[in-house]
Structure formats: C-alpha cells, structure tokens
Image (cartoon, rainbow, N blue to C red):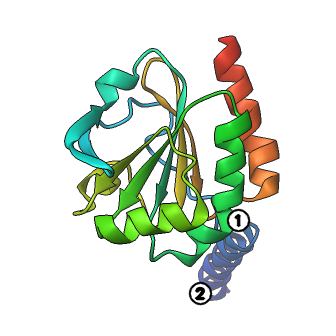
Amino acid sequence: MKRYLLPLAIFLVLVGFFAVGLGLNPREVPSPLIGKPAPAFALPLLNAPDKKLSTQELKGKVWVMNVWASWCVPCQQEHPLITELAKTGGVPVYGLNYKDKPTDASAWLVKFGDPFAATLTDREGLVGIDYGVYGVPETFVIDRQGVIRLKHIGPMTPEAMRDKVLPMLAKLRSGDA
C-alpha cells in the first residue's frame, strides 16, 4: 500500500504545479530590476553620434525608455501608442535603438514619426543586456531617483497603457511612489 502512496503523492504535487503554471500569463515575466536603480549608461544619440546622454543627466525626473528597432514589426504596431504617450504622458520618452543600423533607425523614424526626446543607440545590445531586455519592444518607467518602477515586455497595448503605464506615471509625478 505504501509503495502506491508515494508515487500518487508525487503525481498530485506535479498536477498542482502544472495547474498553477497554466494559470500564469506568459507576458508577465517578473523583472528582478523592478525597485532597483536603472543600470547606468552613457550612449551616443542616434542623430548626433558625437553627443551622449547618460542616466546621470536624467536623474531628478520621471522618464520612460522604449526599446525598439527598425527591423521589429511589433515596434511599428506599438508606435502610435508610444507617440501618444510622448505627447500627452507628461514625461519625456527616450528611445533605445537596439541592435540596429543607425541609417535604418533614422529612416524608420522619418517614415513613422519621431516621438522621442532623444534616441540612444545600443548597436551591440550591451545596455539592453544590463536592462534584462528579452527582445524588442520593451518599455521601462524610471522614477526621479533613477529606480525602475515598471517594465512592460512586448508591444504596448491600449490596456497596458491605461491600466499600468499611465497610473504609474501619475503616481510618480505626484510623488506618491
């Protein structure tokens, strides 16, 4: 009898793990960076490669970083939402052009519009690695102290903008977070 109970118990535990796993949202990948300082960078600007922008210069203000690339189809799909956020979100939105050719990135911004306060180039993807980027697009919200408060993986949706990004920005701008 005992030799049947152990396999049955192991089976039931595995069924429990599978049941919990099936209920999880695969888009919700927890980031270990939430609540931690944003990794430092000093990157060249896409349209002025001789100039750099660093995280140090962004301290003291709430800002958004959108990781994108000209070769990324979902980036094109989310672009109208990022453009709207840049116009009405009340915070600067910076683009992090990820593993892309500067000429392709510049042409893409001309074609679809440039909503960014500045576009930084990360040709080797090293800053993307520091930020834990799984793929493009990804969007980060960073507070006045330079701490990552939100990470959205994948293309921005109207629901994510309404339910996650805009409330977080409102909280950070009011000083409640």
- Of marks 2 and 1, the one in the foreground: 1
User: Which of the numbered marks, if any, corresponds to residue 3?
Assistant: 2
Q: Image quarter for residue 53? A: top left
Q: Which residue is mark 1?
A: 25
In the shown orientation, is residue 21 left or right of residue 65?
right
The answer for how far apart the CA atoms under marks 2 and 1 are is 37 Å
- Residue plotted at (30% across, 23% down): 56
Question: Does residue 176 appear in the picture of this structure?
Answer: no
- Residue plotted at (22% across, 38% down): 51
- Earlier sequence position, callout 2 versus callout 1: 2
In the shown orientation, is residue 116 left or right of residue 79?
left
Report helix, strand or loop for mark 2: helix
Please state which of residues 159 and 87 is positioned toward the viewer in this rendering. Answer: 87
> Callout 1, which amino acid?
Asn
The x, y position of residue 112, in whole percent, is 59, 64
The x, y position of residue 109, in whole percent, is 50, 61
Quarter of the image with the N terminus in it: bottom right
In the shown orientation, is residue 36 left or right of residue 50?
right
| Mark 1 neighbour class, 10 Å CA radius: few under 14, some 14 to 19, many 20 or more | few
